[in-house]
Amino acid sequence: MKRIMTLFLAIILSLGLAACSNRAELKETETFLNLESGGTESETHTMNNELNTVNGTLVVYFSATGTTKPLAEYAADFLNADLYEIVPEDPYTEEDLAYDTDGRADREQNDASARPAVSGGVDNIDRYDTILLGYPIWHGQAPRIISTFLETYDFSGKKILPFCTSHSSGIGSSDVNLHDLAKNAEWFEGRRFAAGTPREDIKAWLDEMEITADKTVGDISFDLESRTVTLNSGHEMPINGLGTYSLHGDECINSVKSALQSGVRLIDTASAYGNEEEVGQAIREAIDEGIVKREEIFVTTKIYPGSEMANPEESIQACLDRLDIGYVDMMLLHHPDVNDVKAYKAMEKFVEDGKIRSIGLSNWYVEELIEFLSQVDTIPALIQNEIHPYYQENDVIPFIQGKGIVVQGWYPLGGRGHTAELLNDPVISEIAGVHGVSSAQVILRWNLQKGVVVIPGSSNPEHIKENTELYHFSLTEEEMYRISALDRGEKHDWY
């Protein structure tokens, strides 16, 4: 299931899946938060500078000779928009395009019913509410392949702004004659541009039409003063918490309450853990005892592959019923599954109903994520994967963060049977000694400075409290790289 891939390969795969490409570039380099000791209160950690955008605008163009292409690219750049090229299944040759020769283009333009086939298509056209549609003028009209495109999708409620390129002809009636092909769209007046139109003219047109740039998916910086990160869903999530895997019964209840008493505000559970009832009970008791208010806690749970994802509405409601805390702050799909898209769309409905605040994925990697994102409308707010110094996911983390998705690490201290080895690693122990902290604190701080939310598990109240004391020191750039050098690609669980 897991594919270890380089970021370069990931980009190639994403380009291969669709002709629609995002204008943001993925950065391959790691970014660390380098703070002076004690200087942590107002510092933030900004992940990749180039973030994907909320894909509200799509620039679509057909450019048989390359004249329309640069103008479409200018518009996409200015708007942070996605870009889609209409590519004919049967490419046009110079002979096809020869004017007034009864060539292919002439014949198509003289036949109002002609619909040249398009190669590929736009994934999830519903993502976009504004479409810029660019084309050359052929015999005073848009090429018939534009008609093919417009008749392929439902543009109801969308704004369409046509623009054309020509050497001498104006836009004429070419834009108006397209209106009947997308009757339920809101059409704007088209604009003609000459070949070689400069970028500034495209910008002036967009400003005149009051078309503004898409907002970025979100600044996924860690606020070390509030100890939170703002998700792309708009909700704030604590950046350190308690994982409850393997905790059951009174041990689970006591551990969760101990964590809440120690200031932990992020609690992670799952249907598969079999402890949602205990987690919910602990939270309700803590609220009743005045330890915390419900709105101060961020609770994450997950549904599992198989029967749960096959019957997602029932499974999601069962999680809510077992927790019995009113709503869930985050729900994840625990693993990829044949029904994962179906389950994700069910979670989206629960978000609309206010029963879930944010949704995401667990154990998704580059290849799985590329395939998954092309099938859903809501960008995940969080992806939770195994991450620790011996398994660092240095190819995966930047890819996820580059999409404006927060990364959370499970098994941050190595996991069952491996924790002692990791805590006693000579490099980590030495760094811990320099700062006067524990090895666990060094590892957790290392994660935070990589922009990874941590959810270490423990039933020991002293360890739970220690795992929250991560903000009075910081690791130097050299220390960060020394820990990075420990990566073995050593996964400690099967998924």
Image: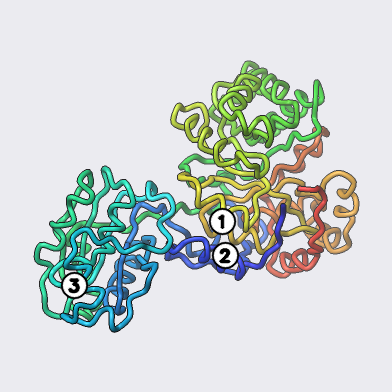
Q: Is residue 388 left or right of residue 155?
A: right
Cα gap from disc 2 to disc 1, whole angstroms: 8 Å
Of 148 and 484, nearer the camera is: 148
Mark 1 — residue?
A: 370
Residue 85 screen position, x and y as percent? 36, 66
Q: Is residue 379 above or below residue 23?
A: above
* Residue 331 figure quarter: top right
Graded by Cα atoms within 10 Å as few (under 14), some (14 to 19) or many (20 or more), the crowding at tag 2 reads some
Residue 375 screen position, x and y as percent? 50, 48
Graded by Cα atoms within 10 Å as few (under 14), some (14 to 19) or many (20 or more), the crowding at tag 1 reads some
Instruction: Write the residue at 10% across / 71% down.
Output: 170
Instruction: Write the residue at 18% across / 81% down.
Output: 101
Of 345 and 258, nearer the camera is: 345
Graded by Cα atoms within 10 Å as few (under 14), some (14 to 19) or many (20 or more), the crowding at tag 3 reads some
Mark 3 — residue?
A: 138
Mark 2 — residue?
A: 13
Instruction: Write the residue at 31% across / 57% down.
Output: 149
